[in-house]
Image (spheres, rainbow, N blue to C red):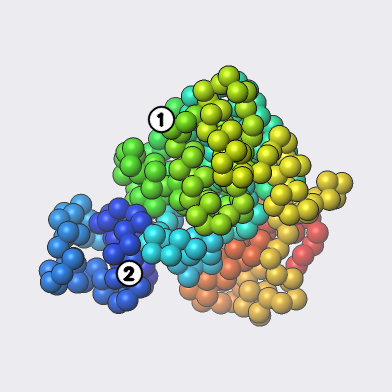
Amino acid sequence: MTSDRLARARLTYLAEPADEALNALVKDVGAARAMEMIESGSPGQTARWRQRLADVPDTVDLTEHARNGIRLVCPGDPEWPSRLDDLGEQAPYALWVRGNGDLRFACLRSVAMVGARAATSYGCYVASEIASSLAARGWAIVSGGAYGIDAAAHRGALGAGGVTVAVLACGVDHPYPAGHIELMKAIAADGVVMSEWPPGCNATRLRFLTRNRVIAALATGTLVVEAGRRSGALNTARHARDLERPLMAVPGPVTSEQSVGTNMLLRDWQAAVVTKAADVTAFLGPLDPENPPDPVQPVLPWDELDPSLKAVLDALPARGGASTEQVAAAAGVAFGTALKCLGGLAAGGFAQRCPEGWRIRRAHAAEGVK
């Protein structure tokens, strides 16, 4: 485990996300050196971060977190979604991730769906229907795991057998709201539950707003299904606009307070009008509805994989699963090489995590990709 990796894990305890000064320091001297400067009391602005040193574990036991199904994803890792780099000095220091899906691969073709917590039956129905149809077309759904539109979007994707990503404003070990614990388990089974905040961290009002920039950055485009005048979903929409990402909205009844925000997006922000999944796919990229692309098609052709990747891919079982140690032994490579290759294969769409460890992605097993 590199000193940079451990330092980034500790920084997630030390500072709130989107701290531009800390990101600038990390960019300048590296995460490990930045952590050393904060701990040693180097003069300057590090003083404000030292106030929270007591909250930082002396040793972040990533192995113990891994036993609980939680992994750390850092910039440069195969699973790191490159779209987050567009956040510049507000990019996450690292991500805490739970789930059998691969975050980077899921977000390559994804739609952020957000909206009101106190959603109407109209809003929940539309969110569920659009998410379900998008998932059937191979699009992943990114949302915040909250009540209302978020939950309807996640459940719509799950109902279609699709992949969905929940971006939390708290630690992934005790999701908020508590009423969605079972929903989070369902999301993690084939998708991803993720957060910038470390395990054990509670949600706060400000953290929800901070989290919204990540939802907008992860996805190909953002769809606001239903939102009132002061809805937090409009904050997500603003981030999407600032990132120059496609912004869409579902029109709502002019008599509904929960549609004031979405109608404003259409009128003042020139958001694209969406009434069904086909509108989303037409706006984000033309798709053939009779022949939708494979949602797990690899990013690279098999022929372009290097020998180590091919060896590890050949060692993966098509059924059940194998631990990293078993894969390394079967492939005849070192444990570290196997771990790196597995990350690359997952990010490329060839491999997937499972309760037993690792296996070849189902679609490729059926096709005999090996």
Amino acid carrying label 1: it is Ala
Within 10 Å of the Cα at label 1, are there few (<14), some (14-19), or many (20+) other Cα atoms? few
Q: Is residue 247 left or right of residue 296?
A: left
Q: Earlier in the sequence, mark 2 or mark 1?
A: 2
Q: Is residue 137 above or below residue 315?
A: above
- Outermost residue on the front side: it is 268
- The residue lying at 43 percent from left, 32 percent from top is 230
Q: Position of residue 102 (x, y in %)?
A: 57, 56
Residue to which mark 2 is pinned: 24
Residue to which mark 1 is pinned: 178
Q: Is residue 45 left or right of residue 216?
A: left
Q: CA distance from mark 2 to mark 1?
A: 35 Å
Front-most of residues 223 and 78: 223
Q: In front of the other: label 2 or label 1?
A: 2
- The residue lying at 38 percent from left, 64 percent from top is 89
Q: Position of residue 12 (x, y in %)?
A: 32, 56
Q: Is residue 116 above or below residue 342?
A: above
- Asked whether the viewer can see residue 202, the reply is yes
Q: Quadrant of the N terminus?
A: bottom left
Q: Is residue 169 above or below residue 67?
A: above
Within 10 Å of the Cα at label 2, are there few (<14), some (14-19), or many (20+) other Cα atoms? some
- The residue lying at 25 percent from left, 61 percent from top is 59
Q: Position of residue 296 (x, y in %)?
A: 70, 55
- Can you tell which quarter of the image residue 367 is in? bottom right
At mark 1, the secondary structure is helix
